[in-house]
Image (cartoon, rainbow, N blue to C red):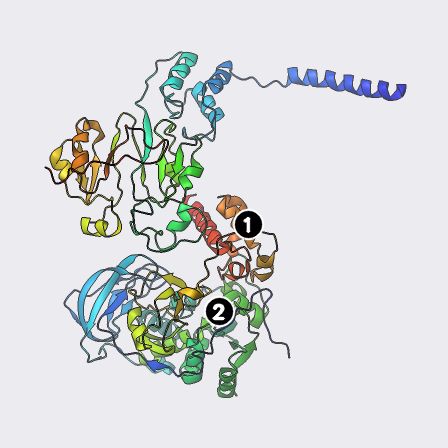
Amino acid sequence: MLAAILSLGCIGLFAAVALGIAAKKFAVEVDPRELAILEALPGANCGACGFPGCAGYAKALVAGTIDLNQCPPGGADVVMKLARILGVEASATARQIAVVLCQGDNRKAQLKYHYLGFEDCTAAQRIAGGPKTCPGGCLGLGSCQRACPFDAIEMTAEGLAVISREKCTGCRKCIAVCPRNVIRMTPYASTIHVLCNSHDKGAAVRKYCQVGCIGCQICHKTVPDAYKIENFLAAVVYEHDGEAGEAITKCPTKCIRDFAAGYPDGSCQLPAVADNSHAA
Amino acid sequence: MKLKTFAGGIHPPDNKQWTSHKAIEVCSLPAEFVVPLAQHIGAPSVPCVEVGQQVARGQEIGSAKGFVSVPVHAPTSGEVVAIEDRPHPWGTALPAVIIRPDGEDRWSSALQPADPGTLSPEDMVERVRRAGVVGMGGAAFPAHVKLSPPPEKKINTLIFNGVECEPYLTADHRMMLEEPERILQGVALLQFIFGAERVVIGVEANKPDAIALLTQLCAGAPVEVVPLEVKYPQGAEKQLIAAVAGREVPSGGLPMDIGVAVHNVSTAAAVTDAVIHGRPLIERVCTVTGPAIREPKNLRIRIGTPLSHLVEACGGLLEEPGKIILGGPMMGFTQLGLNVPATRGTSGLLLLRAADVVLQPEGPCIRCARCVQACPMHLLPTTIAAYSRRNLIAVATEYCAMDCIECGSCSYVCPAAIPLVQAIRYGKAAILAKKRSS
């Protein structure tokens, strides 16, 4: 009994001393600023900065090899904190968020076949260009949702991805996995978007989608500065979108939508738009 | 006597009884031909005719671009009415030459027959290339590439594939019965090109009439006819080599690495046409079958014939098809509609009724390992599929995902209806993309 206590005690004592010496002798020096930066960063390890995780970004910041506005999830807040820690001037950038430029879900857009494979948009896209007839529309299998580190993307019951304006940090992970390039970065301040990603001619779009842009140019004629038409697809010119709202009710297919009123949190549904297209 | 075969594989019902006894019928010319410029593995051809131009049967209308590419030819004489994107069996719209037949079916005068005795192997390969011959088993890989192995790879065994292990299809079977001379001439030409010592024709044992006929015709010739066990995928290249030659193609390697070359029997017939008659590959035999068609047939079709015309030639549909498959049910491509044309790789058109198509939702893997037993490449399909789906590409590579031949045996036996082949194909594409980017 006593021998056991003594021998175990001795081993414990020896190990404690050895570890203590080793900890002192082989200590890795870490810049205290690096720890402070790591503390200030969101810690999601999303990789938006180009490093595998926040630690890599922190190291690069201390080494001075990267700008401190490379963390979109952190936003302006984190940039200010980092500037304080590193003692440099901050150049905050305007907040950017991702938007799914499509509202053609399974009720509104035509499917060309019944997809029975596994839930992944890239895998579905490989089979005859995806189950949706539209070549640019959201496939609705949720690859972006699974890629989002911030839980900002919801899939509607009808198969459409919607991104929360508030939760999105602009890390671009969803953009990287989307095989149809239907998700775009837009300024947070701009709430009006053309929700269509099909460059097909109007007659073709009308055949497969009730809410696709047909390239009719009415929005451009209503507010010339705020809209541009390229390859039969309208897009908001975000630099001059002050008056863009005027075209919303004019759009014959209702593909210009204003996100200011709560979409997509909650119901994942946009309120109906008053039909004013024949009035003007 | 025990028949030769490989390890693994499955036994799906072969459903060949509908067409195996029916002689090949010549299909009439459609009102319009849609000849896709991409019909083979490799670079698509570039059009070398203009809209409004008159073309003759067999005239080149698309020239090859690069080494792994072949020209395409006019299936009949007529006028080029358009060169535009049309729905393609691969699922999207791709460039095609549209030809309206003039009804004369006049051969091009540029085609020159030749006496094979005066040709060198190189001349023959060149004639095969110019004729646009591709592998007729379905993959449509340019034949001249397979006929020009690097000099250090000596081919000593030449295997001809008359297995036709895909259920429903009987096109190769009828070719062997009705045109054995054309096939055997091609066999002799290919043997001369390769200088191969051993020549084997492998035929599955469910075609005893073809085996008997070929054995009789090959008596005295240096060609063996080997009956093989009825099992899917007996006609896959590596499985055929394992059964006939008892050799295994190394992982990531090609049959020529072990001194073997495999060609389809119908490819041999196309080589005969190309080398001796100078005629390009503009027609093939295609089995139009399935429960949704009124009168299943083996048809001799011109390349570029719309599928809807093939259906008409077989008495039309009994009901709206639930699934349209180009090729066999195991490895064929499901089509969105009948508006696509038949290509050089179209060995069959299978029309299933809606009631024949089982849409079982995917369930969880129960670790029964039936896919592992079935895999003819001795892989672990469920493991590779799981890693592929989780984008763990490096691990999928370690489990030899690239060795998968996509035969569909694993998906066929899976009781949970897991889309294993789809997941593995997805993983293979990701591995290739990673290889290209690094």
Quarter of the view holding residue A241: top left
Q: Quadrant of the C terminus of chain B?
A: top left
Q: Nearer the viewer, residue A36 or A123?
A: A123
**Residue B290 point in image, percent of width and height:** 41, 72
Quarter of the view holding residue A272: top left
- Residue at label 1? B364
Observer able to see residue B304: no
Q: Quadrant of the N terminus of chain B?
A: bottom right
**Residue B424 point in image, percent of width and height:** 49, 53
Q: Tag on residue B430?
A: none
**Residue A15 point in image, percent of width and height:** 75, 20
> Taking B160 as reference, is A210 left or right?
left
> Residue at point 21% right, 64% down?
B48
> Residue at point 31% right, 69% down?
B307
Which secondary structure lies at badge 1?
loop
Q: Say which chain tag 2 marks.
A: B
Q: Nearer the viewer, residue B392 or B306?
A: B306
Where is B47 relative to B219, above or below? Answer: above
| Circle 2 Cα neighbour tier, 10 Å, few/some/many (<14 / 14–19 / ≥20) | many
- Residue at label 2? B261
Distance from label 1 to label 2 (Cα)? 41 Å
Q: Nearer the viewer, residue B433 or A202?
A: A202
**Residue B423 point in image, percent of width and height:** 48, 51
| Circle 1 Cα neighbour tier, 10 Å, few/some/many (<14 / 14–19 / ≥20) | few
Q: Say which chain tag 1 marks.
A: B
User: Which three-letter amino acid code belongs to the residue tagged 2?
Assistant: Ala
Observer able to see residue A113: yes
User: Which three-letter amino acid code belongs to the residue tagged 1?
Assistant: Pro
- Give the number of marks: 2
Pair 1/2: label in front: 1
